[in-house]
Image (tube, rainbow, N blue to C red):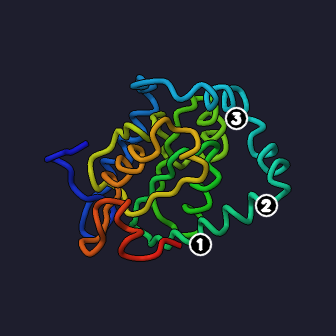
């Protein structure tokens, strides 16, 4: 996924409202999905948007809040940054990042049911219905990316990570290939 007209968003002196508007527009149009998610993921997340948070707390023996807090702590966003929360589900991480750092957050998920629950809980966060394997954003659109259970529900985790690398605005001193990051420094 390359885009010659992509321009950075979210940093001082640049503009990101166009990307936020585009994200909102994608939700309104109910973007056609390029392909369906794996069958098990579709079955698991169909019809559970309203009860997902309670089920997650029960199935994790209450540890989900602690895991989410650790993820949010690791983001280290600043006001003006733009964060993409991939596989946002009901938007718990997106909301926590937005509240903690005062930055723009866009949530992305392939499940309309989960996004409906997210809209009810997080009306101010733009939500996009799309798959992580085929992101509808220009290259280098986001300062930070978050996701929790994404890789267990995609057909090709390596291809998904490459797609995420395209939309992440990585500093020049960091490798562009996420698989090479582990070779240069330990990933926490």
Do the residues bearing badges 3 and 2 touch, measured as CB atoms within 8 Å?
no
Separation of marks 1 and 3 at Cα, in angstroms: 25 Å
User: In the structure shown, which secondary structural element does the residue marked by tag 2 occupy?
Assistant: loop
Q: Which residue is mark 3?
A: 49
Measured as percent of width and height from the top left, residue 114 is found at: 63, 35
Upstream in sequence: badge 3 or badge 2 = 3
Q: Quadrant of residue 13?
A: bottom left
Residue annotated with mark 1: 73
Q: Is residue 168 above or below residue 125?
A: below
Q: CA distance from mark 1 to mark 2?
A: 16 Å
SS category of the residue bearing label 1? helix
Relative to 159, 112 lies left or right: right
Residue 27 drawn at (x, y percent): 46, 33
Q: Which image quarter holds the N terminus?
A: top left
Of the pair 92 and 148, the residue shown nearer to us: 148
As measured in the structure, the alpha-carbon distance from the residue carrying label 3 to the one carrying label 2 is 19 Å
Q: Earlier in the sequence, mark 1 or mark 2?
A: 2
> What residue did someone put label 2 on?
63
> Which is nearer the N-term, disc 1 or disc 3?
3
Identify the image quadrant of residue 89.
Answer: top right
**Mark 2 surroundings: few (<14), some (14-19) or many (≥20) residues within 10 A:** few
Residue 180's spot in the image, x, y percent?
A: 34, 65
């Amino acid at each position: 996924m390359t885009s010659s007209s992509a321009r950075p968003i979210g940093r001082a002196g640049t503009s990101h409202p166009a990307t936020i508007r585009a994200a909102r527009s994608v939700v309104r149009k109910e973007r056609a999905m390029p392909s369906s998610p794996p069958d098990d993921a579709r079955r698991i997340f169909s019809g559970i948007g309203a009860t997902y948070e309670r089920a997650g707390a029960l199935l994790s023996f209450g540890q989900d809040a602690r895991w989410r807090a650790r993820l949010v702590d690791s983001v280290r966003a600043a006001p003006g940054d733009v964060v993409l929360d991939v596989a946002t589900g009901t938007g718990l991480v997106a909301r926590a990042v937005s509240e903690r750092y005062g930055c723009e957050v866009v949530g992305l998920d392939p499940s309309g049911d989960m996004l409906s629950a997210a809209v009810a809980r997080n009306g101010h966060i733009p939500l996009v219905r799309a798959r992580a394997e085929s992101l509808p954003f220009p290259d280098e659109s986001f300062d930070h990316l978050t996701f929790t259970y994404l890789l267990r529900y995609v057909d090709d985790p390596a291809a998904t990570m490459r797609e995420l690398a395209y939309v992440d605005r990585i500093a020049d001193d960091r490798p562009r290939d996420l698989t090479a990051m582990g070779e240069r420094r330990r990933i926490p």
